[in-house]
Image (spheres, helix red, strand yellow):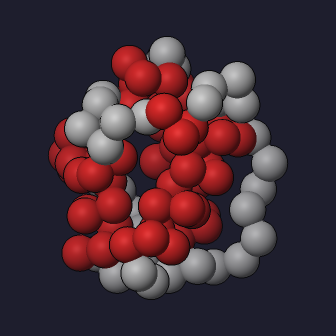
Amino acid sequence: MTPAAIRAAVLSILGGIAPEVDLAAIRPDADLRDALDIDSMDFLRFVVRLDERLGVSVPEKDYARVRTLASCIAYLSERGASERGPPRPG
């Protein structure tokens, strides 16, 4: 997947978790938990959805590598993300 496709998939996943947030306003270097005002359970849902949708399992030791939009896209690109199917709601 291209970085642009990964970015679109990540934003789609985040939109399901925090539908009230203006995703276009998220800075690439902003901490996603702070920018979206999500708790640790929502962040865990995000990580699980990355695996379900993009086929990339993110071990707990790598959570810091997916905390910003830019680092998440880079991590997923490095790990060979590929679209698995339609997104799950929420």
Quarter of the image where the C terminus is located: top right
Picture quarter with the N terminus: bottom left
Residue in the image at 51% along x and 73% along y: 5
Residue shown at 40% from the left, 63% from the top = 57
Q: Please say if 2 is above or below 58.
A: below
Residue 14, image x, y percentages: 58, 42
Q: Residue at x 31, y 74 (%)?
A: 77
Q: Is residue 50 above or below residue 79?
A: above
42 and 12: which is toward the camera: 12
**Residue 78 occupies quadrant:** bottom left
Of residue 37 and residue 53, the one placed in the foreground of this image is: 37
The picture places residue 18, in percent across and down from the top left corner, at: 64, 29
* Horizontal side of residue 2 vs 84, given as left or right: left
Q: Is residue 3 above or below residue 80?
A: above
Describe residue 85's horizontal placement relative to residue 38 as left or right: right
Q: Which residue shows up at 55% across the image and 50% down it?
A: 11
Question: Looking at the image, which residue sits at the far front?
Answer: 25
Of residues 57 and 11, the one drawn nearer to the viewer in this rendering: 11
Is residue 77 placed above or below 15 in the rendered structure?
Answer: below
**Looking at this view, is 33 or 49 the one in front?**
33
Could you tell whether 4 is left or right of 15 in the image?
A: left
Task: Name the spot of residue 47 as percent of width and height, x first.
Answer: 46, 48
